[in-house]
Amino acid sequence: MQSIDEIINESGDVREVKRALGIKLLEQGMSPSQISQVLNVSVQWVSKWKGKYETSGAAGLLVGYQGSVGYLAETAKTAIVGWIEKQTTVTVEEVRDYVEREYGVVYQSKESYYQLLEAGGMSCHQSEKANPKRQETQVQERREVIKKNWRRIVPKSKMVS
């Protein structure tokens, strides 16, 4: 993207579009205080991006961060997803061990393993139809205790002062 108009029309990043709009409005004669009200930014923000535009051109308005390179190649991810799909049940720990054993990668966060499980058609959050720890005798005993301790209360609005 070489021009302000290209950034406005083609950028998928809202921050870049907002910066380009600020510069375009400056070029059209709006004051920084008017631009700050229109774009809901500070006057200092307008001055900052005006300076970057003057020194670097339209490229100076672009977001510089491009992200980091992933730990696994797409072919490795595809192979892991294929392995997950073959499993009837699998835990996050089993996926972690498999990825470490086969590819030498250990993620810091479990979120990456959750994403692999989801891509493989697995859900790590499965509900159960009934509480497996529920003991019917304890439930009935507790209900009886509650019934014995019930008492009628008079609402405050009906109480006589």
Image: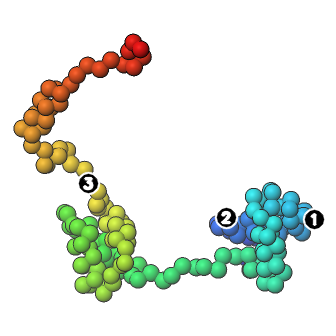
**Residue on which disc 3 sits:** 126
Q: Residue 97 occupies which quadrant of the picture?
A: bottom left
Quadrant showing the C terminus: top left
**Residue on which disc 1 sits:** 29
Q: Position of residue 57 (x, y in %)?
A: 80, 81
Sequence order check: which comes first, mark 3 or mark 1?
Answer: 1
- Given the image, on which type of amino acid does mark 1 rest? Gly
**Residue on which disc 2 sits:** 14
Residue 46 in view, yes or no: yes
- Above or below for 150 versus 91: above
Quadrant showing the N terminus: bottom right
Q: Is residue 69 left or right of residue 24?
A: left
Q: Residue 77 occupies which quadrant of the picture?
A: bottom left
Sequence order check: which comes first, mark 3 or mark 2?
Answer: 2
- Given the image, on which type of amino acid does mark 3 rest? Gln
Mark 2 vs mark 1, CA separation in Å: 23 Å
Q: Classify mark 2: residues with Cα within 10 Å, few (<14), some (14-19) or many (20+).
A: few
Quick one: 88 or 105, which is closer to the camera? 105
Quick one: 84 or 36, which is closer to the camera? 36
